Amino acid sequence: MLILTRFVKEYEPVRLAEEGRKMGYEVDLVKYGQISLGVSGGKVEIDLRKKRRLDDYEVVVMRASSKKGSSMVGTKTAVLEMLKRDGRAKVLNGESFEKFPLMGKLEQGLVLAKYGVSTVDFVSFGSKSGWEDFEKEPWFNFPMVVKGRFGSHGRAVKLVRDWDGFEEVMKGYKTGEVLVQPKLKIKQWYRCIVVGGKYLGEMRHRQKSKYEGEEGKLVKLSEKKMRRLRELCLKACELFAIDYAGLDVAWDEEKQDWIVLEINRTAQFKYFEKRTGVNVAAEMIKVVAK
């Protein structure tokens, strides 16, 4: 089994390696940055270091390939293409990565809306004139949320309350890399995990104060509403041909309905395992070990 990752000592690749070994696999962890790609004598050469070859593996798990503004998506995509052509190894989320190499918030929103899955309204622009038109005829009222097309842990998310704040935030973004959204009335949201078409559970979170989350006690939602949550998560994963994902889904206090905020195909699962007791790593490997 091959695990491709940014950091070999992170919780998730370590857990995947543990569970892989329990299932009888020899496991190698390789950083994306260690991989060399090229063509020699008309043949593709992929060097994983230590004389490791792609065709040595039966199972491949690809973790996130970007960090701190740098990206190894090109390397990840090239490796995936070679694995597909060889046809021997089973790749977790392989079909999804192939169909949607870049699956940022923009792509997610468009596809979810097209197929009737409730998601956040947004607008994005391909030129400076788009920003100018938006300021003349805004789609939403303040406060608004400005976020990067890509990003995790809320690092690229800003709440703006007026045009001065809006223009200041926009200085930090390039055209086409940002989405503008209305601020939703959210008190609580959930991180949900789906593996192999099976809903494993959810963790509830309070919306952070910096995003002006709604006040009041968090409440246990009805079984009917939670069943609806599970249905949305499963449908969203089906649309993107996903084997494994962590989905952030919020309960909109104004609409009284669920909204899918984001889908992460390489989501961390450390706290999910610790809080729920669900062995996510084992479930992930079972999908590709069938």
Image: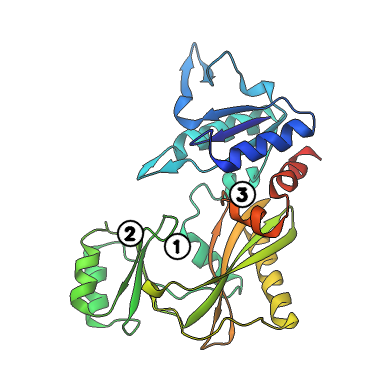
Q: Count neighbours of disc 2 (C-alpha within 10 A) and say few if under 14, some if 14 to 19, many if 20 or more.
A: some
Give the image location of residue 133, x and y in percent: 24, 76
Q: Residue 239: which quarter of the image?
A: bottom right
| Residue assigned mark 2 | 176
Residue found at x 62% / y 83%: 219
**Res. 113 image quadrant:** bottom right
Q: Nearer the viewer, residue 210 or 241?
A: 210
For image coordinates 68% across by 58% down, the residue present is 194
Q: Residue at x 66, y 81 (%)?
A: 220
Most foreground residue, 191 or 182: 191
Q: Secondary structure at mark 3?
A: helix
Residue depicted at 66% across the width and 70% down the height: 232
Which quarter of the figure has residue 33? top left
Q: Is residue 68 left or right of residue 51?
A: left
Give the residue number, with chain letter if any, for mark 3. Answer: 96
Callout 1 crowding tier (Cα within 10 Å): few <14, some 14–19, many ≥20: many
Q: Is residue 174 above or below residue 46?
A: below
Q: Mark 3, residues whose alpha carbon is within 10 Å: few (<14), some, or many (≥20)?
A: many
Task: Point out the residue furthest to the top here.
Answer: 41
Which quadrant, please, contains the N terminus?
top right
Q: Which amino acid, mark 2?
A: Gly
- The vertical placement of 220 against 104, above or below, is below
Q: Which mark is residue 106?
A: 1
Taking the image as drawn, is residue 242 in sight?
no
Q: Is residue 167 visible?
A: yes
**Tag 2 and tag 1, C-beta contact below 8 Å:** no
